[in-house]
């Protein structure tokens, strides 16, 4: 059984009132779950690499705010509706500002570009000691994910993303670039992303989505006035760990991005955002009704 490790991973097991099995029917993984400022400051204090000034701004812009709260709400509602079920939430507390728990760390830079994602290890990590520390945390997190999963578990990989596709390269001047990109006159010019997006389509166009679950999610969200994209933001790519889950569990793995302005109250990219309870509730029902299609 997986167990929480401070600063690395939080494990939350949500059991229905009539659940008899120990293993989870569903694992909700949040690989970018370090969403609190303390997650950043705690790990930054352990690093020896010179970090860009005000890098915490990038942390806030680039972490999946609202995903942990939505995961908890989904898990609780699901076991209320189906009291024989067990849901385990696996939340990384390792900021992707330093190392990304949804990347194959040894993938080539070209692979990250092809998948339209940020690197596995950020360019400001320059010392061997920091690389060893971060890789150790990364490996520890993924062992916890493996320990949480049973052979028959389904997995929901839950993410949130910025409302607009801000085209900024990750480099040592990332904070300055982001401040320019989010200037009031500039930010509205970037393309608006789908309210939700299912990340299941590979570069060759093949979709690995669990069709019944996605169709149910799309239909349920439509009643709330929300639309679901079909991989319009990112492809499903082998440079991500999400690819491994999807390949290992055909038809039993789903990766979803939720736009952060649907979660935050209000959306403000450069601070630790508050999450709106009403916004979470609006999305919980559609997710639960869709995920039940797995059973």
Image (cartoon, grey):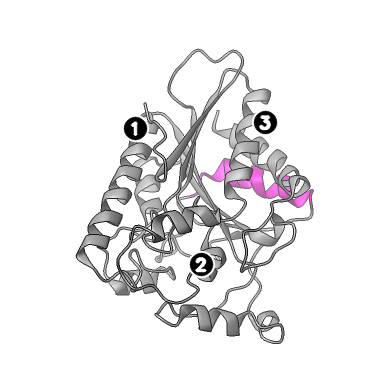
Span highlighted in magenta in the image: 209-224
Task: Decide: few, some or many residues near mark 2? Use Cα within 10 Å; few <14, some 14-19, many ≥20.
Answer: many
* Mark positioned earlier in the residue sequence (1 or 2): 2
Above/below status of 234 relative to 150: below
* Circle 3: element type: helix
Residue 167 visible in rendering: no
Q: Which mark is residue 147?
A: 1
Query: In which quadrant of the rendered view does residue 258 lie?
Result: bottom right
Quadrant containing the C terminus is: top right
- Element class at badge 2: helix
* SS under mark 1: helix
Foreground tag (3 vs 2): 2
Is 251 situated left or right of 49 in this image? right
Q: Nearer the viewer, residue 166 or 6?
A: 6
Q: Nearer the viewer, residue 42 or 72?
A: 42
- Counting residues from the start of the chain, the first of labels 3 and 1 encountered is 3
Q: Main secondary structure of the magenta part?
A: helix
Return the disc, 3 or 2, that comes first in the chain's sequence: 2
Q: Which residue in the protein does label 2 denote?
A: 56
């Amino acid at each position: 059984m997986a167990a929480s490790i401070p600063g690395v991973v939080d494990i939350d097991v949500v059991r229905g009132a009539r659940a008899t099995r120990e293993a989870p029917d569903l694992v909700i993984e949040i690989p970018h779950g370090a969403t609190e400022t303390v997650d950043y400051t705690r790990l930054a204090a352990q690093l020896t690499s010179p970090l860009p000034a005000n890098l915490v701004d990038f942390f806030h812009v680039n972490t999946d705010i609202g995903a942990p709260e939505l995961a908890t709400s989904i898990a609780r509602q699901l076991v209320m509706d189906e009291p024989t079920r067990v849901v385990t939430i696996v939340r990384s507390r390792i900021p992707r500002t330093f190392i990304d728990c949804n990347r194959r760390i040894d993938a080539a830079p070209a692979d990250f570009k092809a998948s339209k994602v940020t690197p596995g290890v950020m360019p400001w990590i320059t010392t061997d000691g920091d690389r060893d520390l971060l890789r150790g945390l990364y490996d520890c997190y993924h062992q916890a994910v493996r320990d949480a999963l049973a052979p028959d578990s389904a997995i929901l990989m839950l993410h949130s993303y910025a409302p607009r596709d801000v085209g900024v390269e990750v480099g040592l001047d990332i904070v300055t670039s982001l401040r320019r990109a989010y200037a009031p006159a500039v930010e509205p010019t970037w393309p608006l992303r789908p309210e939700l997006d299912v990340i299941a389509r590979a570069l060759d166009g093949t979709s690995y989505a669990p069709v019944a679950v996605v169709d149910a999610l799309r239909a349920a969200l439509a009643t709330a006035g929300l639309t679901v994209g079909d991989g319009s933001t990112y492809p499903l790519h082998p440079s991500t760990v999400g690819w491994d889950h999807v390949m290992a569990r055909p038809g039993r793995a789903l990766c979803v991005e939720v736009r952060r302005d649907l979660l935050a109250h209000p959306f403000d990219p450069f601070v630790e955002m508050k999450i709106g309870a009403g916004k979470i509730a609006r999305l919980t029902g559609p997710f639960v009704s869709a995920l039940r299609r797995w059973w």
